[in-house]
Amino acid sequence: MTSKRQLLQTLLKGIETGEAKAAAVVNESKYIQHNPQTHEGSEGLATLFARLAKTNPKVTFIRVFEDGDYAFAHNEYDFSSLRAAFEVFRFENGQAVEHWDNIQPLRGPNPSGRGMLDGQTQIRDLDQTEANRALARDFVQNVLIARQFDRLEQFLSPDLIQHDPDLADGIAPLHAALARQNGDTPHIRYERLHKVLAEGNFVLCMSEGHKDGAHTSFYNLFRIDTGKIVEHWNTVETIAPRSEWKNDNGKF
């Protein structure tokens, strides 16, 4: 039986080839599309793939994970310009029935010389998946959403490896970014955690909030080792206004 990890890769390779058959991985009758810029169903995907193929795109899978009914990937896209992306699919009976993503232009290196996609890729500690999921959920809910920044050291390694394009390694730069204010408004405001996906030592948290006053989707990938977050990747994407959506499902 084809794994969900393999199905995800087969589907997304259709971006390169433009072949409509790649969209056959999708169950069109059930498919729920959460990319506001994409039409519903496999017909929408086929049209998207055909359009993107004209730009000679390249899809590079950096990290691919599987969690129950879900597969999720950390990718590099070349659509005339480079982008970092997280892709999430939910599967039923060997077909994709729901999709989320978060994409931003590839930037960097950051002040510590790191790119948005480099770093550790090995999946390990499968027996710690649920403990790591719980730790990442607690971090987002208590530190990022509840803004209990005094608890950063409880969750983060002092030697945190940082792939955010604007931040250096360690706890202090992240603390400063989270605490930064624009007048009376936080520069970054996490408001709701929607989904936590995990495999072994990697956990992806999908959150909603605001950045510089704009409605924003935050995807954060954490690598966890012995009860601490030791490495962090992210993408930050402004959510298009409702008037521009091509489906009614919402970003989350």
Image (cartoon, grey):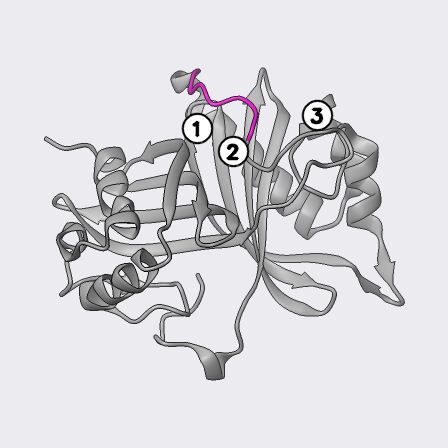
Front position in the image: 51 or 65: 51
Residue 188 on the magenta segment = no
Instruction: Please tell me whether residue 82 is drawn above or below residue 113 in the rendered image.
Output: below
- In the rendered image, the vertical position of residue 246 relative to residue 12, given as above or below: below
Residue of label 3: 160
Mark 1 and mark 3 in contact (Cβ < 8 Å)?
no
Marker count (numbered):
3
Q: To which residue does mark 1 refer?
A: 130
Callout 2 crowding tier (Cα within 10 Å): few <14, some 14–19, many ≥20: few
Question: CB of mark 1 within 8 Å of CB of mark 2?
Answer: yes
Q: Residue at x 18, y 50 (%)?
A: 22
Residue identified by numbered label 2: 134
Which residue is at a point 83% across and 34% down the rendered structure image?
A: 172
Read off the magenta span.
Answer: 118-124
Q: Position of residue 197 (x, y in %)?
A: 42, 39
The amino acid on which the numbered mark 3 sits, given as a three-letter code, is Leu
Quarter of the image where the C terminus is located = bottom left
How far is disc 3 from disc 1 in space, using C-alphas?
21 Å
Q: Is the magenta stretch mostly helix, strand or loop?
A: loop
Amino acid type, label 1: Glu
Secondary-structure class at tag 3: strand
Q: What residue type is labelled 2?
A: Ala
Mark sitting earlier along the chain (3/1): 1
Query: Is 173 left or right of 140, judged from the image as shown?
Result: right
